[in-house]
Amino acid sequence: MRVFLDTSVVKAEGYYFQSISMKSIIDVADQLGIELLVPDVVYEEARNLHENDIAQQLQLVRKALTAIDRISRTKLDDKVIGQLESQADQMYWGWLMNTLLKSPFRRAPLPEINNYQAMIRAIEKGPPFGGKNDGYRDYLIWMTIVDEVINGEGELPVHFITQNVHDFAEDSRAAKIDLHHRLKLDLEAVGVRSDSVVLHRTALEFRCVLTLTLRR
């Protein structure tokens, strides 16, 4: 079994896979040889989002220090904040490299992209381009998944955990989400079944599916 993780899942997990569901998935994957695939785009985006979140929180700290300076007539060293920001980024990047590059995780490299096809899809606003600024990023993740379906080793379907169901699902409000029909056509166009990729909203949802699968 192969399972793709989206950046939305990494962020929802507090960047460090802290939930019971995700820890359970990792343990089971390690025991049974299930691969947890992380696209190149997700590595870079997770680091960028983490850096931005840290910067936002430290900005609040800077405002607090300014307020303390004003009422206490002391001058607190702002350099410490900059050091914390740098340390947090280095620590997280180190964690990404040490954790997500060893079993049961596997890095999924970015395949060659036909930019003309990407341009047409973007102009048509076809999935996963939903009119948002991150449409191209979603397209890169989708093409990484398609490349794995075609060239990777392992049984199908491939599972994809993403909270960004609006751009990947046929009906994002449905109780059980299904891959968008346009994305199913992408799969058929490369000679694989349209049900070769299965969507899941959260780690908890996939954990339930995994549990039922193992009981059969």
Image (cartoon, rainbow, N blue to C red):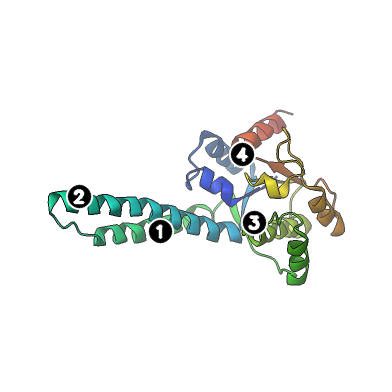
Residue position for label 1: 89
Instruction: Please state which amino acid type lies under the numbered disc 1.
Output: Asp
- SS at mark 1? helix
In the displayed orientation, state which residue is furthest to the left.
73
Q: Position of residue 162 (x, y in %)?
A: 64, 46
Residue position for label 4: 202
Quarter of the figure with the N terminus: top right
Instruction: Please state which amino acid type lies under the numbered disc 4.
Output: Thr
Structural distance between the alpha carbons of marks 3 and 2 = 40 Å
- Disc 3 + disc 2, Cβ < 8 Å: no
Residue position for label 3: 132
The disc, 3 or 1, on the residue closer to the chain's N-terminal end is: 1
Instruction: Please state which amino acid type lies under the numbered disc 3.
Output: Lys
- SS at mark 3? loop
User: Of the residues tagged 2 and 4, which is closer to the observer?
Assistant: 2
The disc, 3 or 2, on the residue closer to the chain's N-terminal end is: 2
Q: Position of residue 41 (x, y in %)?
A: 60, 60
Q: Residue at x 77, y 45 (%)?
A: 179
Structural distance between the alpha carbons of marks 3 and 4 = 21 Å
Structural distance between the alpha carbons of marks 1 and 2 = 27 Å
- Disc 1 + disc 2, Cβ < 8 Å: no
- Disc 1 + disc 4, Cβ < 8 Å: no
Residue position for label 2: 68
User: Of the residues tagged 3 and 4, which is closer to the observer?
Assistant: 3
Structural distance between the alpha carbons of marks 3 and 1 = 27 Å
Q: Residue at x 64, y 56 (%)?
A: 132
Instruction: Please state which amino acid type lies under the numbered disc 2.
Output: Ile
Label 1 neighbourhood size at 10 Å, few (<14), some (14-19), many (20+)?
Answer: some
The part of the image, by quadrant, that contains residue 34 is: top right
Quarter of the figure with the C terminus: top right
